[in-house]
Image (spheres, helix red, strand yellow):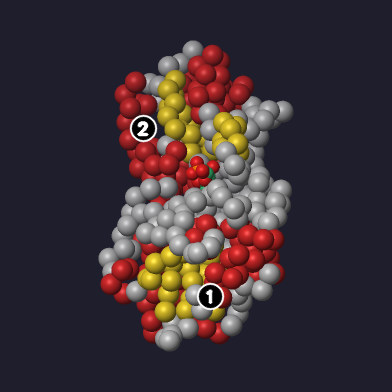
Amino acid sequence: MKPRIGVLTSGGDCPGLNAVLRGVVLAADKLGWEVIGFRDGFEGLLPPGSYTILDRPSTNGIMALGGTIIGTTNRGHFVAKIGAGDRAVVAAEVVEQARKVLQDLNVKALIIVGGDGSMTTALQLQEAGINCIGVPKTIDNDLEATAMTFGFDSAVDAVMDAMDRLHTTATSHKRVMVVEVMGRHAGWIALHGGIAGGADIILIPEIPFDYDKIASAIKDRDARGEHGTLVVVAEGAKPRDGQQVKRDIEGGEFRLGGIGDIVAREIAARTAKETRSCVLGHLQRGGAPTTLDRILGTRFGVKAVQLANEGHFGSMVSYQNYQVRHVPIADAVNRLRLVPPNGELVQTARDVEISFGD
Ligand code: F6P
């Protein structure tokens, strides 16, 4: 009987997960491992184990598909993180049940594809004696210890596409269009999507904004004859002395959303311009992965299997200086990679007359 590698996808879905799974299967096949995919994230590890054999036929042609063929969840028994930096502990009996399921299935290594919260859980499983390898995933691109995660490029592409569409309607109507994008703690999606989509104002969590400054940037544009304005706001952005706009808490992290409408209202009140807002929401997470995400996902999947094969347990695949390497999972946990407010990218945005409302 071949030794087995287990793989699961955890947290919010994102484009490129299936490219990882395909990469895992092909690399494992080459090295003589059998792969089993646990369904619906860590929940698949609960007794008696919910899984499917992943092989060449079952992963053939999946690379172009969004989402994950084995399912995922950012809720459930294994949620080990509630909010930024607040560590919740997975119950010891749940970890023990998972260990037993893996042992009974002859799984020698478990590849966990997920973000910050999933890596926190992975660390706990590793500490409990389960051989874990992490693969970093999040559209927010805010995971520490890797220069990039797959899924981010596809999300930025969706924002850019939306901006291109909104640009023509904004200029035709001489309106302000406010687009709310994802990004809980980090403004990478808003910043990249905003620059690529020709935004005039970008609001990110790392740079608290001032409504009067936003209004004056819009009035300056009007005075120059530029009557349509595009504003991108990350869901986690907040005004100086203000709070993030939260919807609710649903058995895990709180949900953000609603800041776009508020920003639009405040702009209309201060400029008397027609202002509309739209929320891109999960449109940014669905659909086919971009070229970059397919390649990055494939490279990450292959590397994860090689790490398992070499016994580098407790490590996470990491992208550094154009190379796929590995770091301890612990390096990626509880330390978010935020946009440096005085960094080159923000400065470049300012140099092309993008305002951050500060
Ligand atoms: O962390 C990724 C992310 O897409 C965030 O940007 C967003 O706040 C969250 O997931 C949304 O999660 P859910 O799918 O539970 O609404």
Q: Is residue 154 left or right of residue 188?
A: left
In the figure, 124 relative to 306: above or below? above
Residue at left 27%, top 65%? 61
> Depth check: 71 or 84 in front?
71
Residue at left 68%, top 28%? 242
Q: Is residue 92 left or right of residue 8?
A: right
Whether disc 1's CB lies below 8 Å from ligand 1 is answered: no
Q: Quadrant of residue 1?
A: bottom left
**Residue 14: x percent and y percent?**
44, 53
Residue at left 65%, top 70%? 126
Residue 196 showing in the rendered view = no
For label 2, the SS is helix
Mark 2 neighbour class, 10 Å CA radius: few under 14, some 14 to 19, many 20 or more: many
Farthest front residue in view: 48
**Along the polypeptide, which appears first: circle 1 or circle 2?**
1
Quickly name the residue at label 1. Answer: 104
Mark 1 neighbour class, 10 Å CA radius: few under 14, some 14 to 19, many 20 or more: few
The reply to whether discs 1 and 2 touch (Cβ–Cβ < 8 Å) is no
Report the disc number at residue 166: 2
Which kind of residue does numbered mark 2 sit on?
Leu
Q: Mark 1, mark 2: which one is toward the viewer?
A: 1
